[in-house]
Image: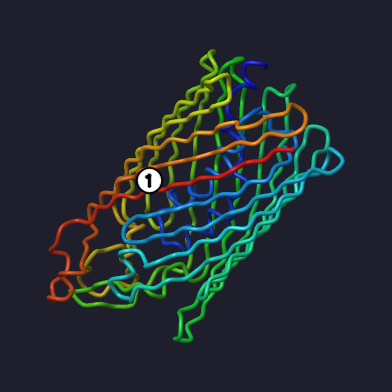
Amino acid sequence: MAATSRLPALLARWRLALLALAARRRLRLPYAVAARMLGVLAGLLTYGSARAVELPEDRADVMYHYYDGAGTKASGPAVLVRKSLADKVSLSGSYYVDMVSNASIDVVTSASPYKETRREENLGLDYIYRDTQITLSGSNSNEPDYVAKGAGIDVTQEVFSGMTTISMGFSHGWDKVGRKYEGFFDVARHWNYRLGATQVLTPRILLSANFEAISDDGFLGSPYRVAYVNDGPVKENDPRTRTSRALMLRTIADLGSHDSARLQYRYFWDTWDVRSSTVEAGYSRYFGGERWLGDAYVRYYTQDRALFYSDNAIGSPTYISRNRQLATFKSYGLGTRVAYTAKSVPGKYSIKLNGALERTRFNYADFTDIRTEATQGVIATGKKFSYDATIVQVFVTLTY
């Protein structure tokens, strides 16, 4: 197990899952982008042992994040603090701020640009009992026209002398959706079920499989977005229920010289007929006497459109959406992460400087930038939309 314990903890559960869900709903970013914006803070900071049934180490993290893509910019600070009690309980709290300017391209074509601030708080509790870890979490997110609350529980159990780890979890979210200055109000509810297993295949290879089921109910669109039918704008109308499934397989290999490689595949499908596949490969390495930890990865994503999505529909459809996240598109991502141990006193404390940078390219097959065409009364005759997105994170970690 010594070799396995040197692996970066790429299988560690992202403690800010609820934050990621809230972020992708409100920032109008592709889900994978929003998840990574918050996931790096939870994932990059947890390099170390891959064992699940251990309390997370005491730590304090301060981060600045920045996103720029498709005309939308979001930036702000984040703080995460964790403290253990009596070697059985670990408490955590985080505060996250997004200062957003401009809406995404599919919203700004039917609404004026805006600036707003989203604030989110998250509380967590981890409890260890023998070979079982129980995690409770709760979150609260506030914007001028959107309030999201969530709560969840996860249970992790080691079996077969620690060679296998089984995990399961459930979370529930409830949102209040509004539209500024117009009196619009609706609600949305979300149920998330998780099941996973991690297996030590050899002293150098880990394999994991994770299944996720999500059920959504209520207002699932945007009150600011319009669709186009027969060249004319109409109010977007999404179904009020959605059931999604996702399966992810991942393997990590210790290459034996302070480095590791990973490969993962994720398949997603839902009742709106959206289908997507994600392939990611990465490489991590300690160097400089293990004071530096570097990671590089590439990602490819492809998605088929929803049944009721259309850039410019014909006829009189019951449901209609021009949400680009429901369109047909592909994306290509390239990223890197670096952690530097500036100061370390074994058994007392350590200070790490961390940075992450990602560039992603999005190419749409059936979504058009209509900002020029719409003013001329012509829709869907322009060039198919594409854009580059940049994600930057810089943060400091203190473990004690």
Query: How was the colour assigned to the protein in this rendering?
Result: rainbow
**Pointer 1 residue:** 276
Most foreground residue, 336 or 276: 336
Label 1 crowd (10 A; few <14 / some 14-19 / many >=20): some
Q: Is residue 390 above or below residue 280?
A: below
Quadrant where the N terminus is found in the figure: top right
Q: Position of residue 386 (x, y in %)?
A: 24, 53
As drawn, is 101 to the left or to the right of 369? right
Query: In the current view of this chain or complex, which residue is farthest to the right?
Result: 86
In the displayed structure, 221 sits above or below 178; it is above
Q: Residue 316 or 231: which is nearer the viewer?
A: 231
Compared across the picture, whether 66 is left or right of 370 comes to right
Quadrant where the C terminus sits is top right
What amino acid is at disc 1? Ser
Q: Residue at x 70, y 38 (%)?
A: 399
- Which residue is found at the position 79% from the left and 43% from the top? 84
243 vs 67, nearest the viewer: 67
State the SS at label 1.
Answer: strand
Give the tally of numbered discs.
Answer: 1
Residue 154, x across and y down, in percent: 69, 46
Residue 131 horizontal side relative to residue 237, left or right = right
Give residue 68's quadrant in the image. Answer: bottom left
The residue at the point 60 percent across, 37 percent down is 196
Please tell me whether residue 228 is drawn above or below residue 68 in the rendered image. Answer: below
Q: Residue at x 55, y 26 (%)?
A: 207
Q: Position of residue 42 (x, y in %)?
A: 59, 43
Residue 27 % position (x, y): 45, 62
Residue 279 against residue 367 in the figure, above or below? above
